[in-house]
Image (cartoon, rainbow, N blue to C red):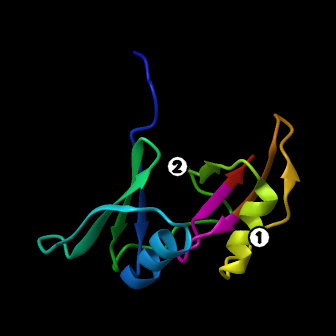
């Protein structure tokens, strides 16, 4: 079995307005599709992410994500950037705080920031 690339990643959010504002307006992901799923009582927003997609499910009744101590499962999403300092300045200029930039022992530099529900997101240069 060969995996060519990541097709999509899915994120569950709790607040439609905050999640859409963060992922679309602040981070700049273009909306591919968006619809309310009445049978489930949630929103599904497909966002363009390179050649794939970031699926954003907005489920107000979803339980909070365990964070500290970290739980099993997906730990975070990481986005490659060309200039980490420029990316941090842009995020912080939009009111999104970032952790200090650190050196990755495996190569490159990285930092973390969080979405409105506390999901860790990484920038990696």
Q: In the picture provided, is 91 more to the left or to the right than 52?
A: right
Q: In the picture provided, is 69 more to the left or to the right than 24?
A: right
Residue 101 percent coordinates (x, y): 84, 58
Q: Quarter of the image holding residue 63? A: bottom left
Q: In the picture provided, is 5 more to the left or to the right than 114?
A: left
Q: Which mark is residue 89?
A: 1
Magenta segment range?
113-122
Mark before the other along the chain sequence, 2 or 1:
2
Q: Secondary structure at mark 2?
A: loop
Q: Is residue 117 magenta?
A: yes
Decide: is 99 above or below 94.
Answer: above
Instruction: Judge whether residue 67 can be spotted in this image.
Output: yes
Residue 44 percent coordinates (x, y): 28, 66
Q: Residue at x 76, y 52 (%)?
A: 83
Disc 2: which residue:
73
Instruction: Judge whether residue 68 can be spotted in this image.
Output: no
Q: Do residues under tags 2 and 1 come within 8 Å of each other at their CB atoms?
A: no
Q: Secondary structure at mark 1?
A: helix
Q: Residue at x 54, y 77 (%)?
A: 116
The one nearer the camera, 106 or 35, is 35
Q: Tell me the crowding category of disc 2: few under 14, some 14 to 19, or many 20 or more residues within 10 angstroms, Cα based.
A: few
Q: Residue at x 67, y 56 (%)?
A: 122
Foreground: disc 2 or disc 1: 1
């Amino acid at each position: 079995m060969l995996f060519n690339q990541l097709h999509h990643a899915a994120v569950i959010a709790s607040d439609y307005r905050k999640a859409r504002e963060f992922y679309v307006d602040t981070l700049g992901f273009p909306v591919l599709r968006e619809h309310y799923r009445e049978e489930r009582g949630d929103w599904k927003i497909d966002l363009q992410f390179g050649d794939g997609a970031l699926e954003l499910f907005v489920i107000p009744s979803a339980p909070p994500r365990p964070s500290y101590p970290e739980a099993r499962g997906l730990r975070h999403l990481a986005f490659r950037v060309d200039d980490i300092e420029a990316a941090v300045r842009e995020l912080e200029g939009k009111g999104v705080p970032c952790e200090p930039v650190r050196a990755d022992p495996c190569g490159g530099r990285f930092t973390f920031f969080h979405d409105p529900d506390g999901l860790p997101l990484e920038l990696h240069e």
